[in-house]
Each structure stands twice: as structure tokens, then as C-alpha cells.
Amino acid sequence: MAGTDINQQENQGAQESRIFQPPPDFVANAAISGMPAYEKLCAEAEADYEGFWARLAREELDWHKPFAQVLDESQAPFYKWFEDGELNASYNCLDRHIKAGNGGKTALVFEADDGTVTRATYQELHERVCKFANGLKSRGIKKGDRVIIYMSMSIEGVAAMQACARIGATHSVVFGGFSAKSLQERIIDAGAVAVITADEQLRGGKHLPLKAIVDEALALGGCDTIRDVIVYKRTGGNIAWTEGRDIWLGDLVDAQAADCEPEWVSAEHPLFILYTSGSTGTPKGVQHSTGGFLLWAALTMKWTFDIKPADVFWCTADIGWVTGHSYIAYGPLAVGATEVVFEGVPTYPNAGRFWETIAKHKVSIFYTAPTAIRSLIKAADVDPKVHPKNYDLSSLRLLGSVGEPINPEAWMWYYKNVGGERCPIVDTFWQTETGGHMISPMPGATPMVPGSCTLPLPGIMTAIVDEAGADVANGQGGILVVKRPWPSMIRTIWNNPERFKTSYFPDELGGKYYLAGDGAIRNSDTSYFTITGRIDDVLNVSGHRMGTMEIESALVANPIVAEAAVVGKPDDTTGESICAFVVLKQARPTGEEAKRIAQELRNWVAKEIGPIAKPKEIRFGDNLPKTRSGKIMRRLLRVLAKGETITQDISTLENPAILEQLKEAS
Ligand code: PRX
């Protein structure tokens, strides 16, 4: 919890006074129609918390064996939901729609990097998933085994996740931009038995290796649990082959039976592990359940996205992040929706790609990240041809934002130019750990304020407290917590229950409140929440979450580096950018040499973690600003990174002269 001063953080949204009402025709047809309907649900949860969740779990999911127990708090904070109930996530996403007569409905519309379109109906996806599941079983993969998925965005990627769920194997998807070393660490931590990958991925017209990185990860050693590497042929590019270990996906699944009885699992069975960054140490394997996770993925599709049978839903995230889990691989399928799965990047072949794709597939609900919006605003300023006004976006009825704060200017642009001032925007605040939306407008109920995620979803007991866990008044900044467990919450950190407790249920807050790791403030008039940013050493670059310590560890692992400190710096496009202060073992480089070494170190970080962790800026010093007891003063580094003058008290600083050196970028 140490770190930035919450009260000093910017809270543009909290002061924003413009209010946008949801359009009346939207309200009329919405799942949650009008504020009284929202308030009624909140009151139901307040009055009978377990009864509320039990009702929803019975209504939203098909249970093979009904649950009798709703919430088990006996081993708090290791909460259990619906534990004696049995179900299967894949059954709930596929079979039940076919049984209801909707097998012919399009489930996935795959928009490839080059614009080629492939579709799969629920019936076809069911067959693909069943064959995939049977293929996995034929290799001895079974319930409880962990399977790593290191795949491009594809129908096969979604099918791989669903196939694991079908047989009760716990998947762990690793984003395709992570390095071999990051992949190896996750394989080892998860103790995975197989990796599902593709030969290459296609992004922005470029072929990027996947299988070669898997080979490299396994060659780094320690991955002895891996028996199979299953390879989807995406590009047909040249790859190395290890006989006996590597198998083409086609060879594995083509001859399999087209039906596969789902493995019925307890609601608490781990559906997946997803690694994410914390403020210290190695990435954390966030473990999610089957029942609670799926319930919330389905319900938020209905409440936040107001999904209707005729909608075409498009979430632009990658399956490597939690957004791609909840709102590509599970949520849309759980509610029987049609969704677009996109392989490419927003700027290829030009920065009109998103708008063109919305028009092409008549997308009605569009969900993306503020970074993408900001970069497309810039692109449209430079090249008016890619401005959204040049595309037919009349199919849109709802817009969403996720992953980072959306600044009011970007919100307004999105509202006017993409949504034509007729589409509500849901600014959804949530996290890998929360499994689904926590704070967000309900599009047919909540009046919207640009830059504010507004109010918690019904049943989500968020609050803002001080460092001792006491509630703070509206208008005062504080620490965002959730006071009651909810079904889709993180269950534990894989292999590290102790870290789960200390990270999320710290004793300082009484051990009862879930600590989100963000600061927040509520508006004095509306009680709306505005997220003011992380209060720990976690950075958010383009909506990607990274720990400063991870990047520092990567830097000091380079033999020429003596010491490194990493801080975030506000960035117009990416929200935050990475700024590293580095002390080399050799004399402090300047000029061309500094540029060359900085580039070398950037590439090094890309190799250690992945290109997303590359520092945008590296500054060299003879030392770092430290207190007399040797503690690095990060607060000063943040000020230096911003290019601002230091006004804080520096009397405890051991070596004030060093600040001059670190002022300028190399
Ligand atoms: O700081 C918050 C920010 O993203 C963090 C969670 O990152 P991750 O686990 O990678 O999940 C991202 C996708 C859900 C949060 O702690 N964040 C996420 N959504 C918002 C946000 N900050 C402000 N507004 C949001 N809507």
C-alpha cells in the first residue's frame, strides 16, 4: 500500500460535471431499465446476499448437480461459492444453446489480419471443441492437469480454452507477446503437461514466431512436466520439430469423434490460472473457479452489455488477458451471443480498421481500451480518411471501455464520433483478480459522467477506506476495497496461498476486505467512483499491467547493470510509459554511447519479459537518489521522469547531486 499519495493524484473524473443520460429508447429495452431497476437489484443483494447470488446462479447457469451451499466462509479469505454444485463451463457455453434450438446461430466471426472472414455456428464450434477435447484426452490429458495456451487470436484459440474446460483441465493462457523466459516461468509455476500453440501469428501483415518461442522456452530447462506441444498451423511458416513431443493440431483432432461428454466438475474447480503482475516478485498465477467465474461472465454480458439475441458483440482484447477470458472465450458464448474475434491490430492496413470492421460485421456492441481510442484519435487527426465519420457505424448501440482510466476528452470523442451521441458508454473498472466488471454504468440506467466508472454492479460491495480500513467520506481519496466476497473473485494464487492472503486481504485492513490495489474517490454529489490509479508499484501501459520490480529485475540481470529503478510516467497515448533509471557497472555513458546502451537494454528487457515491458526511456546516473538508510526514493524519480521540478523535502537524501544527472533523458 505504500507508494503514491492518493490525495495528490489527479482525479479529473471526480470533478467532471457533464452528465449524459442514457437514451430513452435504450432504457426502454434494457435488461436493467432505469435507476429504480438497478437500485432494486442492489437492495435485493443488501437484504439477502446469499439468496441474491443463489437466485442468479440458478437462473443463469445449467447445473448438472444443483448446489445446496451458496457461500462458505469457514476458511476465509479462501471463500467458496456453490461448492457442492456440479457443472461444466463448455456445456454452458455450447451444448445448452444447441439444446435450445440455437445450434445454427453464428457463435464466432473470425476476422483475420488480412481481412479474411471465417464463421462458426454454435453447432460447428461444439464439434470443434469436442474433437479438440477428445484429442487432448487421447494424449492422456485429464481433469486437473494444467495446459498452457500460447496462441494467436483465432477460433482455435477459443476452442482450445473451451476444450480444456470440457475435460476439466485448467488452462493458463500466456499472451503471445511474452518472451520465452516469461513463458518458461509460467510453464514451471503451473506444472503444465502440454502447450497448445501455433506455428506463427499474423499481426499487421507480419509473421511473428510462436512455436519457435515455445521451443526456446522448453530449451531453457525445468519444464519436465511438459509431454506434448500441440501446434495449430496458422501460416505454414518454417518451424523446428521435435518428434514424439510435437504434434499438429489437425493430426490430433481430425479423426476424433465429434462428441465428447463434458467432465462435470465442482463449481470450485479451477477453470483457469492467469498470470498477472504484482508490486513485488514474480507474476502471480491468479486462480479462478468454474461456477462463480462463469456466472459473472454471463451476468455482466446481460447487465453491463445488455446483450440481446440479435447483437453482434466485439471485444478487441486478446485471449492472453483477462478481458479475453471473460468477454471473448466465455461470457459471450455463455449467453449464446454472436461475437467477432479479431486477429489483427487497430492500425493495419490503416487506422480505420476498427471502424471498417464494425461496418463490415454490423457490430452493435464494441468494447475496447482507452489506449486504442487515443491512438486512433491521433491517427484521424493526421489522416482524416481514417476518421470514424467516413464509415457506416449505424449498427452500434453500445460502447465500452476497459483496462485503464479513460480521460474525459477521449470519452467525448468516442461518444460523439464513434457512438454518434446515441450509444451509452460503459467505462468498466475491473481486474484480472475480479473475473468480471466491478464498477460500471448500467447502460440503460446510469447517467454517465466522462472519466467516471460510476457505480458498483448490484451485489458488488465496493468502498473507499483509509490506511486503517475506516470508510472515508465522499470527496476524499482513499483505497478501493470490496467488503464482501463475490462469486467471480480470485480464489488463490496458484502455488502461493500465503501471498494471496497478504496481497489481497492484508492485516492492516483487518484481513476482511479485498484490496484492489487502486486508489479511488467518490463524487460528493453523485457518489460516483473515479479510479485515481494504482497505489502500489504496478504500472499500466496501454492497459497492460506490469510490475516495476519485474522490469528492474530484468534490467539488473544484465551483466553491465549495477542497479535500476523503474517508474511510470504519464503518457498521452499509452496512459503510462516506462521510465528506467540505470546505474551501470562501468562509468556513466553519455551521448551516442548512452543511446546505444539504452537500445541494448531495451532489447534485453524484450527478451527477458516481452516487448510490452520495454522502457520507453532510460536515463543513466552514477547512482540513484537514496535515503541515508539506502532506500531508493522513487517519489523523486517519478517527479524527474515527468520532467517536473522537485519541490519535495530532500533533506533525507544521501546524494542530492545525483538528481541533476537524472533530469534529462539520455
Ligand atoms: O488500475 C486498474 C486498471 O487496470 C488494473 C487491472 O489490470 P488487469 O488486471 O490487467 O485487468 C485489466 C482488464 C480488466 C486495475 O487495477 N483499470 C482497469 N479498468 C479500469 C482501470 N482503471 C480505470 N478505469 C477502468 N475502467
Image (cartoon, rainbow, N blue to C red):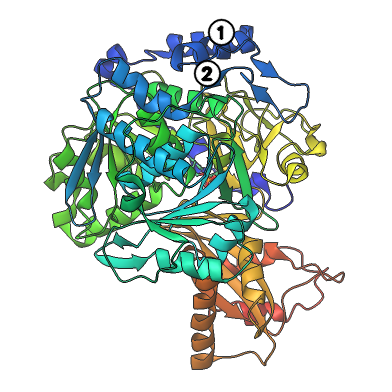
Residue 212: x %, y % from top left = 42, 69
Residue 553, image quadrant: bottom right
Q: Disc 1 marks which amino acid?
A: Glu
Q: Is residue 127 left or right of residue 589?
A: left
Please tell me how crowded label 1 is: few (under 14), some (14-19), or many (20+) other residues with Cα within 10 Å: some
Does label 1 or label 2 sit earlier along the sequence? 1
State the CA–CA distance, disc 1 to disc 2: 9 Å
Residue 444, image quadrant: top left
Viewer-nearest residue: 366 or 198: 198
Viewer-nearest residue: 125 or 560: 125
Q: Element type at marker 1?
A: helix
Q: What numbered label is drawn on residue 63?
A: none
Q: Is residue 14 left or right of residue 203?
A: right
Position of residue 209 relative to residue 661, above or below, is: above
Q: Disc 2 marks which amino acid?
A: Pro
Position of residue 393 relative to residue 440, above or below, is: below
* Residue 434 visible from this viewpoint: yes
For the point 66% across and 58% down, the residue is 282
Residue 186: x %, y % from top left = 59, 56
Viewer-nearest residue: 82 or 387: 82
Please tell me how crowded label 2 is: few (under 14), some (14-19), or many (20+) other residues with Cα within 10 Å: many
Q: Which residue is mark 2?
A: 458
Q: Element type at marker 2?
A: loop
Residue 439: x %, y % from top left = 51, 30
Q: Tags 1 and 2 in contact by the CB under 8 Å rule?
A: yes
Q: Is residue 327 left or right of residue 643?
A: left
For the point 50% across and 8% down, the residue is 40
Q: What numbered label is drawn on residue 44?
A: 1
Position of residue 431 relative to residue 191, above or below, is: above
Residue 225: x %, y % from top left = 61, 56
